[in-house]
Image: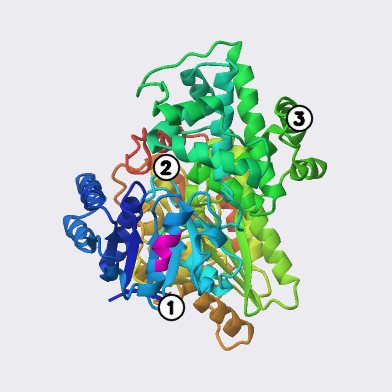
Amino acid sequence: MSYIYKNLSISKLSIIGAGQIGPDICLHFSKVFSKHNVELVLVDISEEALSNAKIKIEKKVQKGVESKAFKPVMADAMKNSISYTTDYQNIADSNIVLEAATEDEKIKNIIFNQVEDICDDDCLFLSNSSHMRPEVIFQNIQNKSRCLVTHYFFPAERNPVVEIIPGEETDVSVTQSLMGLYESIGKVPIKVKSSYGYAVDPIFEGLCQTAILCLEKGYGTVKEIDAVAQKSLGLGVGPFTALTLTGGNPITNHGLDEMNHELIPWFKSPKLLRNAVGNNTSWDIAKRGEKVEVSPEKLPVLEKQFLGAYFALSSYIIDIDISNVSDVNMACEVALVMKAPFALMNKMGLDSVCQIVEDFCGEHKEFPFPKSLKNARQKGKWDISNIVKTVQDGVAVFTIRRPKVLNALNLGVIAELETGLIDAENDDSILGSVITGFGVKAFVSGADINMLASLKTPEEGYENARSFQVVFSRIQNMKKPIVCAMNGFAFGGGNELAMSCTMRIAKKGLPILACQPEVNLGFIPGAGGTQRLPRLVGLKTADEILRTGRPVSAHEAHDIGLVDKLVEGDLISEGVSCVKQLASDELHAKPMITDAYNDGETPQEVELKHLSKSIDAILTRTIYEGAVMNLEDGLDFEARQFGECMKTDDMKIGLKNFLENGPKVKAEFVHR
């Protein structure tokens, strides 16, 4: 067997390097490929390194079994898919070889010279590096068209972001295939042009440099500096702690000095870092659970240093044109677990941001004020997109990309989607559109829960619901066909968006595809769910699904008429094909009922279990009274009823429970 992604077929994959990150990369591949019987080979010249790698991998797999992340059968398949060897000849017949050895030009050259002699001409060569340009790593490879750098982030088996860096001679189609492959196995790839350190590491290591400079200048202790960095940037751990946990002192020390002449002179390893590397000493970081107090005098000084550095560094990456605002914004938030830089700048206001950066550049003379920040200030904001648009064979494809929240919708996302769809509607070269979600888990996980939790009054609830409804009705009424390609589960607002499209197709075999889970959170659907679902699947079926909040599988969704087609192959290609057939009248979609449709059906008995009786009463009224209205009147009625939920105690209880405990803990409703 093999894992197939479009034109890539992977039956054997080899990882070279059993040090710190190689085993973690291997672990991730074992998780996604074991069910496809892909053979994994972990190679190292050291038997001890291989032995330690095996212990490390199997220990993490066992933890996964204990936490119920892996079933025992899957855990065994993962472990059995990996072989450990010192013999490079065992990588023969690999479809992909990924090198994850020491960050050393000579070592990487030696490795790939061996690899090229052993592997077939169509084998892809990947190098996991955090700094080195692909032109340097692959300088002696004869066929450079198949060579790329992949930069994983710690911990590689769980951190979703991977920077993809093609070289000057890398085949464009190879880069595109690799981007798609990584998305298909649960990663979040971003493409970065060849540059030392790529897009994210100059930001991370620049913040580490800032932290150490603050220590040298006496602005705070290690613990204080870490604490303020966490608070001001939203970091999971401070820079000193990150360096300690990842063993990052040596590579950061080397990287900063290389950036000094590769990028700008500001980058330079501070004396304290050089000493720490030379003496093999560690930082005096706070212990787990230790509370660190920072004086009112130190706090603003340190905050300003970190904000100034973060904003300057992020903007600098845009200045050198190796990535884009949206990718860097997302990558910092997801890979580094911190506040998204450009979104934070927009929130703070660019006038105050520019003053912070001017002060930072004034103190750090070798850091030039970024031109891109100056331009953004003139526009009044950074343009950040949560939707990726491509055009395939005359069809616009819109991918909602918010991986941190599983593509959840907020007002900004739907406004951006609406603008894109209107542009496609008015473009004579576009036949229609496909809407899909990023990744393989979720199409859209629902409406952003923090947005809903911020609503305070019934009037705010009504306006919020109507904002979604107006856009979804506009989508439904567009003249050009819009196909929703449901790549994963569609909950709440995601299912409501899907129902507004001309046609819905879904990945075959999904055990959970669609759900209107609002009742579990103490409110009713507000973006059309109570009105469109009954018109698509029938009043009786919709009544039970809406009032219990239960999910339906792809198979059931197709059986009841919620989904028009199940797809085994490439979902987007099928979506594009459906749009073209709809546009040429070769295919006809089931129309949405827009008139009143209830022939006297009344609410059925439903076992509510823990669910709120007060919310069920509001929901039942919304479903059945809306059924004797036309669709637009029904939608307005739904929005008003959504506002009514805000008067209940149960909506407050449901939202609070979800935010504090997540979706698995049932809310204790009081039925009022």
Circle 1 packing at 10 Å, graded few (<14), some (14-19), many (20+), is: few
- CA neighbours of label 2 inside 10 A, class few (<14), some (14 to 19), many (20+): many
Reading the chain from its start, which is encountered first: label 3 or label 2? 3
**Residue type, label 3:** Glu
In the shown orientation, is residue 392 left or right of residue 236? right
| Cα distance between the residues tagged 2 and 1 | 52 Å
Q: Is residue 110 magenta?
A: yes
In this view, the residue in front, 205 or 469, is 205
Q: For mark 1, what is the residue? A: 122
Q: Which residues are magenta?
A: 109-113
Provide residue 14's location: percent of width, then percent of height.
33, 65
Q: Which residue is under mark 3? A: 358
Q: Residue at x 54, y 59 (%)?
A: 136
- Mark positioned earlier in the residue sequence (2 or 1): 1
Residue situated furthest bottom in the rendering: 586
| Residue with the mark numbered 2 | 521
